[in-house]
């Protein structure tokens, strides 16, 4: 149609929709920043939860050390607990997202006609949940493994 009086621009429907979305601004950057803020908030909450769990178990940790649990085993147990909690949360979140988007048929007002949760997105969700578990449990695990038995029994009321 380049030689006609009424030239047209031919593009795929996906390119047409991306053109509309790009007119609204840098949506990708905005979504990434919101996601990073949410991840940071979740990290703080999970870190606080693990610190409180380790603090409440000071007596139990002292008893385990008294009967012969090594510092490395205590460290492994606390990190394993944080990792298990985080993985259960990641499994529920990823499974919930798959279920929700398959049941709702999400299209964002026609901007995203075939929205699906990709396996790569699920894998990234599980990797993030593993990192969250390790990061939130690392400091409480180190503190629990370094805890001296006498000091731990002094803290128990």
Image (cartoon, grey):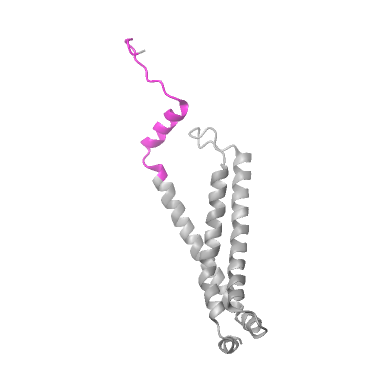
Q: Residue at x 56, y 39 (%)?
A: 116
Is residue 48 found left or right of 95 in the rendered image?
A: left
Is residue 23 found left or right of 120 in the rendered image?
A: left
Residue 98 located within the stretch drawn in magenta: no
Picture layout, residue 53 above or below residue 109: below
Q: Residue furthest top?
A: 4
Q: Residue at x 52, y 69 (%)?
A: 138
Q: Residue furthest right?
A: 67
Segment colored magenta: 2-28
Picture layout, residue 136 above or below residue 58: above
Q: Quadrant of residue 76?
A: bottom right
- Pinpoint residue 95: horizontal percent, then vertical percent: 63, 49
- Pinpoint residue 67: horizontal percent, then vertical percent: 68, 84
Is residue 26 found left or right of 69 in the rendered image?
A: left
- Pinpoint residue 19: horizontal percent, then vertical percent: 39, 32
Q: Nearer the viewer, residue 35 or 69?
A: 69
Q: Quadrant of the C terminus?
A: bottom right
Q: Nearer the viewer, residue 86 or 99?
A: 86
Residue 6 located within the stretch drawn in magenta: yes
């Amino acid at each position: 149609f380049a030689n006609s009086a009424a030239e047209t621009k031919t593009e795929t429907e996906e390119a047409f929709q991306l053109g509309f979305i790009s007119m609204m601004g840098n949506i990708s950057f905005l979504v990434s920043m919101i996601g990073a803020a949410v991840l940071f908030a979740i990290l703080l909450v999970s870190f606080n939860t693990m610190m409180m769990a380790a603090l409440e178990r000071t007596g139990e940790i002292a008893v385990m050390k008294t009967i012969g649990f090594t510092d490395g085993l205590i460290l492994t147990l606390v990190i394993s607990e944080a990792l298990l909690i985080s993985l259960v949360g990641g499994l529920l979140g990823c499974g919930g997202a798959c279920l929700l988007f398959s049941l709702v048929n999400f299209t964002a007002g026609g901007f995203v006609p075939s929205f699906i949760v990709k396996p790569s997105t699920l894998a990234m969700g599980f990797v993030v949940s593993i990192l969250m578990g390790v990061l939130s449990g690392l400091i409480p695990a180190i503190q629990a493994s370094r805890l001296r038995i006498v000091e731990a029994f002094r803290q128990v009321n």
